[in-house]
Image (spheres, rainbow, N blue to C red):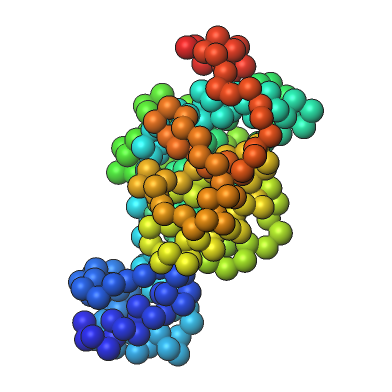
């Protein structure tokens, strides 16, 4: 694609999502826009980029195509193990009156993260408890995918245990559909992390994983500052495995404590209300039904 087209599209994506496309990523942008250009009847990607300035529908499609939606079930495993063995028992012990947990999958992509957590909650929440999972993303195409709760065989093969496939999915033609009980736990909302989050409430656990890597430092820091008021005082924030060692300025250091939980480093609002954690294996087992 022509350098001028690349600059135009990189500026558009930066403005709308804060995702940075560095020079030399022309091949990637071209590969992602080529099918859209063909569908729209454009002779090439340069003509398609020209069209974007006057066609908001295509502009939305192009932005969706350039958000990087790589995800999988129980991605990296360790955060989900830490959730089941340590965070969930601590939250259950701390929420005995409310008997409800709130979880936010920020930058949810096609929903595997939100539904992986939903499966664990289905297995380990005590009877009479409920959970609400908010799944947000800047890509409207991804939010539609979460709402549909349908996945291809290739997607199913990425990290989903066979027992979970049988328990939580039904066949829908060549795809697999999530069961209504899990679907009902997850609600979606369009949210650009680079902008104010609005009145979305406070969460016991926020998964902000594998998205900060696409932003520049001021954007990352702004997000972590705003995030502070959306994590409950005794709640948890989980970043991606390559994002936990981010260099933080002094004010952010003062806002967040880091807690090592197994192989995972969780961020917690500084001075988090102390609840007994981690539990002994025997207490964890009694609370969650997971045998030590
Ligand atoms: C690599 S996926 C990560 C998905 C999931 N969190 C995981 O770890 O598997 C990154 C997601 O971030 C979303 N994203 C990118 N920029 C965003 C922004 N400014 N606000 C919200 N979501 C954004 C993309 O649309 C994409 O779905």
Question: Whole-percent x and y of residue 152?
Answer: 35, 46
Question: Whole-percent x and y of residue 260?
Answer: 46, 32
Judged from the image, the quadrant occupied by ligand 1 is: bottom left
Assign the N terminus to one quadrant of the image: bottom left
Q: Is residue 26 left or right of residue 62?
A: left
Say which of 262 and 16 sits in front: 262
Say which of 63 and 256 sits in front: 256
Figure disc tally? 0
Q: Would residue 205 be visible to someone looking at this image?
A: no
Q: Would residue 94 be visible to someone looking at this image?
A: yes
At a point 71% along the width and 59% down the height, the residue shown is 199
Question: Whole-percent x and y of residue 175?
Answer: 39, 44
Say which of 49 and 21 sits in front: 21
Say which of 143 and 3 sits in front: 3
Residue lying at the far right of the rendered structure? 97
Is 127 rendered above or below residue 1? Answer: above
Is 50 rendered above or below residue 187? Answer: below
Is 53 rendered above or below residue 121? Answer: below
Quarter-of-image position of residue 235 = top right
Q: Is residue 207 left or right of residue 274?
A: left
Residue lying at the far front of the rendered structure? 250
At a point 41% along the width and 66% down the height, the residue shown is 216
Question: Whole-percent x and y of residue 60?
Answer: 46, 74
Quarter-of-image position of residue 129 = top right
């Amino acid at each position: 694609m022509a350098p001028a087209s690349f600059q135009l599209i990189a500026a558009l994506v930066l403005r709308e999502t804060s995702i940075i496309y560095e020079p030399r990523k022309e091949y990637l942008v071209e590969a992602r826009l080529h099918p859209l250009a063909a569908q729209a009847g454009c002779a090439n990607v340069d003509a398609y980029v020209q069209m974007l300035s006057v066609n908001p529908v295509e502009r939305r499609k192009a932005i969706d195509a350039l958000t990087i939606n790589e995800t999988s079930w129980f991605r990296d495993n360790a955060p989900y193990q830490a959730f089941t063995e340590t965070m969930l028992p601590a939250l259950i012990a701390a929420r005995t009156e409310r008997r409800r947990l709130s979880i936010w999958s920020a930058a949810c992509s096609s929903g595997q993260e939100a539904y992986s957590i939903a499966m664990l909650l289905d297995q380990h929440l005590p009877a009479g408890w409920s959970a609400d999972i908010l799944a947000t993303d800047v890509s409207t195409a991804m939010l539609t995918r979460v709402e549909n709760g349908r996945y291809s065989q290739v997607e199913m093969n990425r990290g989903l245990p066979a027992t979970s496939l049988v328990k939580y999915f039904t066949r829908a033609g060549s795809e697999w559909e999530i069961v209504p009980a899990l679907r009902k736990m997850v609600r979606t909302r369009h949210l650009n992390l680079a902008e104010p989050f609005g009145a979305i409430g406070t969460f016991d656990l926020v998964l902000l994983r594998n998205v900060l890597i696409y932003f520049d430092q001021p954007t990352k820091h702004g997000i972590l500052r705003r995030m502070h008021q959306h994590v409950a005082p005794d709640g948890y924030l989980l970043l991606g495995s390559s994002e936990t060692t981010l260099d933080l300025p002094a004010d952010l250091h003062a806002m967040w404590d880091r807690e090592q939980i197994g192989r995972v480093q969780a961020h917690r609002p500084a001075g988090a209300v102390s609840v007994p954690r981690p539990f002994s294996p025997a207490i964890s087992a009694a609370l969650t039904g997971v045998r030590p």
